[in-house]
Image: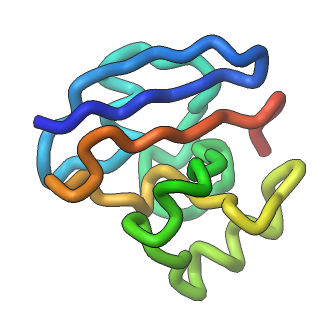
Amino acid sequence: MVQITYVDAAGTPRSVQGEIGSTVMETAIRNNVPGIDAECGGACACATCHVYVDPDWEAAVGPAEPMEQDMLDFASDVRPNSRLSCQIRVKPELDGLKVTTPRQQG
């Protein structure tokens, strides 16, 4: 298990434990983290699990794949550190990961 901190748009942090092999989106849904809608259930077919990866974690998380980049075109307020949380696989190297949810999804 790794710790992931989700910070909402108001700045409120929520730290939860993520299971290795799951995704950052699945971890949020299992732990009732607000701000992650995940309408497509993790199929990379929407942009409702959009998060901003903390700058200190961008290298560890890695860049978005082309399909994810295409879906981010449908997200609101996309930034250079935007990712879809369904595409970030939880691994031991991400222990302590911090992401922020946007004011609105989609």
Give the total of numbered labels.
0
Q: Is residue 18 above or below residue 12?
A: below
Which residue is depicted at the point 19% across and 37% down? 2
Which residue is depicted at the point 25% across and 52% down? 90
Residue 13: image location, x then y, percent: 54, 16
Report the front residue among 52 and 72: 52
Q: Is residue 103 above or below residue 57?
A: above
Report the front residue among 62 and 57: 57
Name the image quarter holding the N terminus.
Answer: top left
In the image, is 70 to the left or to the right of 17?
right
Which residue is depicted at the point 76% across and 68% down? 80
Which residue is depicted at the point 66% across and 22% down? 8
Residue 56: image location, x then y, percent: 52, 55
Q: How is the image coloured?
A: rainbow
In the image, is 61 to the left or to the right of 74?
left
Residue 96: image location, x then y, percent: 32, 39
Name the image quarter holding the C terminus.
Answer: top right
In the image, is 2 to the left or to the right of 63?
left
Report the front residue among 28 and 100: 100
Kindly give the residue lying farthest to the right in the view shown. 77
In the image, is 106 to the left or to the right of 17?
right
Kindly give the residue lying farthest to the bottom in the view shown. 66
Residue 17: image location, x then y, percent: 22, 26
